[in-house]
Image (cartoon, rainbow, N blue to C red):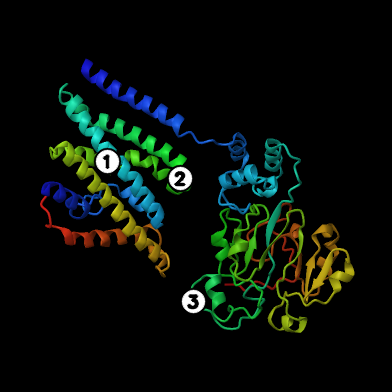
Amino acid sequence: MVELVLILISAIFVNNFVLARFLGICPFLGVSKKVDTALGMGMAVTFVMTVAAVVTWLIQYFILVPFNIEYLQTIAFILVIASLVQLVEMAVQKLSPVLYQALGIFLPLITTNCAVLGLAVLNIQKSYSFLESVVFAIGAALGFTLAMVLFAGLRERIDLCPVPRSFRGTAIALVTAGLLSLAFMGFAGLVKG
Amino acid sequence: MIAAVTSLGGIGLLAALALGAAARKFAVEVDQRESAIIDVLSGANCGACGYPGCGAYAKAVVEDGVSPSLCTPGGQGTVEAIARIMGVEAEAAVPQVAVVRCQGDNRKAKEKYRYLGLADCNAAQKLADGPKACPGGCLGLGSCERACPFGAIEMTADGLAVISREKCTGCRKCVAVCPRQVIAMAPREATVHVLCNSHDKGAAVRKYCEVGCIACQICRKTAPEAYVIEDFLARVVYEHHEQAGPGVEKCPTRCIRDFRQGYPEGSSFRAPGTDVSSDVDAGANEKVAG
């Protein structure tokens, strides 16, 4: 149980996927202009990550390992993740057209989001058990959402500030992301791993 | 090898079946007409119709019965196509262009003070209602130029916005951004316009601008149908714009311009059919060399 809590805390704060591992920067910069779209994207990624962790773990240990075809890991995982994203996209379009409009191109881009594939691969690399994988996935996704929402809040404030012209837009966003990442460095050493 | 092919193929097949089932479950009913309208719209997402993008406008046409003639960039062809899809009679959309109703650049109009702030009209307007002595004149800091998605606006060297009638699509973004409402929409076929936006009395206008309307009534006397003076400012009655021609020559301050004869001086835009070398602006000041 303590193990699981440690994995969760580590994934959210210490080894935050965006701010410490630098995975999933694309949606982090692309869909973080407003807090509510950032939250929606976080939710979508949370769903995809959790389900992807479950399915990829099962595929790894029940198909790839028994048949001795671990070298197919990458393509098999991408296949699963892409299908999941398609599923999420359909669901979002049906359930929340507004969010669907707001996420735009970034929703299908979760397919190629290295955070999701990175999570699946890390689960295998760290030899996590099934339960640990799921907890790690939830932690990573929550960490991603946290980073997204914090960053979106910062960007909403920046929009109201007199930013020098040469810094406007992506430039100031990247500088801010760097500072946010530095802030999260404060958690380093809290949990090993 | 066999294991690899079958396992990967199996995963793919399962995913495909699951997605197929989900697609049925989550199918979104899209009105056929809506997608058809999106296809005929220009896809510029310029907002001229007043909706946030072509998709939103198409939706509004189908669901709320909004007029099909709001897409200015698309022009008459688009209007007719939408009307055909919706099965209603096409209304004639009068294509519009934006006109800068001012010729008072830095050499022709006086300034109240020397403005050294942000190069943005809205910022300048906040500082004691802008540096121009004229309350309605073009501030010349180029906010409209930056807002124009089509490159139809240029700022002359003397700080005056000029809009190319050829490039303007009538999207109204410049109208929205101009803090002094210098830019107004006018029918594309009307080429004669009163290029002044000052409602001050003639005596006051004379003090600060060489090319301002002094409401002297001469244009109205020349072509009574085509001109009207309101609040010390003449304007062309666009229903009778074809009769407005004589006023151009008669105007003592030369603030009425026929765009067929070219654009205000200092502009690089050329009206179709005008010779580049001929300077049509009879009242033009000699350009200072250097």
Please tell me whether mark 3 sits on a helix, a strand or a loop: loop
Please tell me whether mark 2 sits on a helix, a strand or a loop: loop
Q: Which residue is disc 3 drawn over?
A: B117
On screen, residue B7 above or below A154: above
Which chain does the residue under circle 1 lie in? A
Type of amino acid under label 2: Ser
On screen, residue A47 above or below B250: above
Q: Nearer the viewer, residue A176 or B216?
A: A176
For label 3, count other residues whose C-alpha is less than 10 Å away and answer few (under 14), some (14-19) or many (20+). Answer: few
Type of amino acid under label 1: Thr
Q: Position of residue B232 (x, y in %)?
A: 78, 77
**Cα–Cα span, label 1 and label 3:** 53 Å
On screen, residue B120 above or below B5: below
**Cα–Cα span, label 2 and label 3:** 45 Å
Q: Nearer the viewer, mark 1 or mark 3?
A: 1
**Residue, x 18% and y 53% (percent of image)?**
A9
Q: Which residue is disc 2 drawn over?
A: A96
Q: Nearer the viewer, mark 2 or mark 3?
A: 2
Residue B97 in sight? yes
Label pair 1/3, CB-CB below 8 angstroms: no
For label 2, count other residues whose C-alpha is less than 10 Å away and answer few (under 14), some (14-19) or many (20+). Answer: few
Q: Position of residue B117 (x, y in %)?
A: 49, 76
**Cα–Cα span, label 2 and label 1:** 20 Å
Q: Are marks 1 and 3 on the same chain?
A: no
Which chain does the residue under circle 3 lie in? B
Q: Which residue is disc 1 drawn over?
A: A50
